[in-house]
Amino acid sequence: MAETTPRPRIGFVTCVQVGRSVLEALLEMGATVDVLVTLPNDRAATKAGRVRVDDIARRHGIDLVAVPHVDDAAEALRAADLDWLFVIGWSQIAGPEVLAAARHGAVGMHPTLLPVGRGNAAVPWAIVEGLPETGVTAFLLESGVDTGPVLGAETIRVDARETATTLYAKVDAAHVRLIRALWPAMRDGTAVARPQDESQATTWARRTPADGLFDPAVDTVEHVDRLVRATTRPYPGAFYLAAGGEPVTVWRGEPGRRPDGVVLHCVDGDYTVLEAESRQ
C-alpha cells in the first residue's frame, strides 16, 4: 500500500485584501492552514486597507493570533511546526525567528516583477513611472527587503488610463493566479527558487500623502495625470492648493479641456478635474 504524503503544515500572516485572497485560494485548493496571524482590532483601525480574517479562521478552525508586530507571533509560529509560512501584504519586516519558523521557508509576494521595484508603494509607482507592465512576484523572504530567491511571477499589463483602483484589482487577481500556479509544486516539495538578478534591481521609495501634491503652474499635464491616476482610491489622492491655499484632492480627471469639470492650466496644456473634494 502506497504511503500517504503528509500534508504541509502552513502558517499565514496578513491583514490586507491581497493576503485574504491568497489565503482563500489556498484553502479552496485543499490546503490546511494551521495558524493565522493578523493585527489586533485596535491597531488595525489605523492600517490603511486593512481587512479582517477572523471569519475565515472560525469557518476553517484555524488558530488565530492577533499581534501588533509580526515578530510577536514568533513563538506561536514555531510551536505550529510549519513547513511553509506565508507573509502577504504585511508592511513590517519579519525578524530572523519568524523567517526561520518554517522548514521550507517564509514566502512573500510583492506587486512588481522583481528585482524591479523593490520597496514601497508598488502600485502607485508603476503608474507614476509610466510602466507598460508590472506584476506580482513570489519569493523567499530573507533579511533584505524583497531580495530573496524567486519562486515565480505573474505579469500584469498596465493600460494607458490605468488607475490605482483598477491596478490594485489586477494585482489582487494576479496574486490568486500565482498561488494557484505555484502551490502544487510547493505542496509536493518540487518548487524551485532562483536568485534575483542584482544587476537589474531598482528600489522605490516610500510614498506619503504629501507626495500627492502637484502645482499646475510648474507641472506638466502628463505629470499631473499620472499622479492623479496613481494616488486615487484606495490611496489618499493627489491634491493641489486652490486660491487661498485650500488643498483640493483630485480623484479623477483627464488631459485636455472638458466642459463638465474644473480646468487647470498646466505648463504645457490643460487638465480637467472631473471628481474632487476639499481636504479641509
Image (spheres, rainbow, N blue to C red):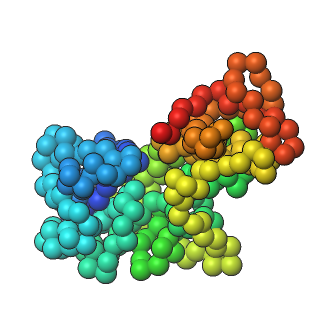
Residue 86 falls in which quadrant of the image?
bottom left
Horizontal side of residue 78 vs 264, given as left or right: left
Residue 243 falls in which quadrant of the image?
top right
- Residue drawn 12% across the image and 47% down it: 61
Horizontal side of residue 96 vs 1, given as left or right: right
In which quadrant of the rendered image does the N terminus lie? bottom left
Work out which residue is located at the far right of the displayed protein and give it: 268
Viewer-closest of 118 and 278 = 278
Viewer-closest of 204 and 105 = 204
Q: Position of residue 187 (x, y in %)?
A: 33, 60
Viewer-closest of 127 and 5 = 127
Horizontal side of residue 66 vs 206, given as left or right: left
Q: Position of residue 76 (x, y in %)?
A: 15, 68
- Residue drawn 75% across the image and 30% down it: 263
Q: Position of residue 21 (x, y in %)?
A: 37, 44
Q: Position of residue 79 (x, y in %)?
A: 13, 71
- Count every numbered label the image shows and give the total: 0
Work out which residue is located at the far front of the displayed protein and give it: 244
Q: Is residue 75 above or below residue 255?
A: below
Question: Is residue 4 visible to the viewer in this orientation of the structure?
Answer: no
Work out which residue is located at the far top of the displayed protein and give it: 259
Viewer-closest of 130 and 87 = 130
- Residue drawn 29% across the image and 59% down it: 13
Q: Is residue 47 above or below residue 120?
A: above
Horizontal side of residue 151 vs 214, given as left or right: left
- Residue drawn 13% across the image and 55% down it: 63
Question: Is residue 130 visible to the viewer in this orientation of the structure?
Answer: yes
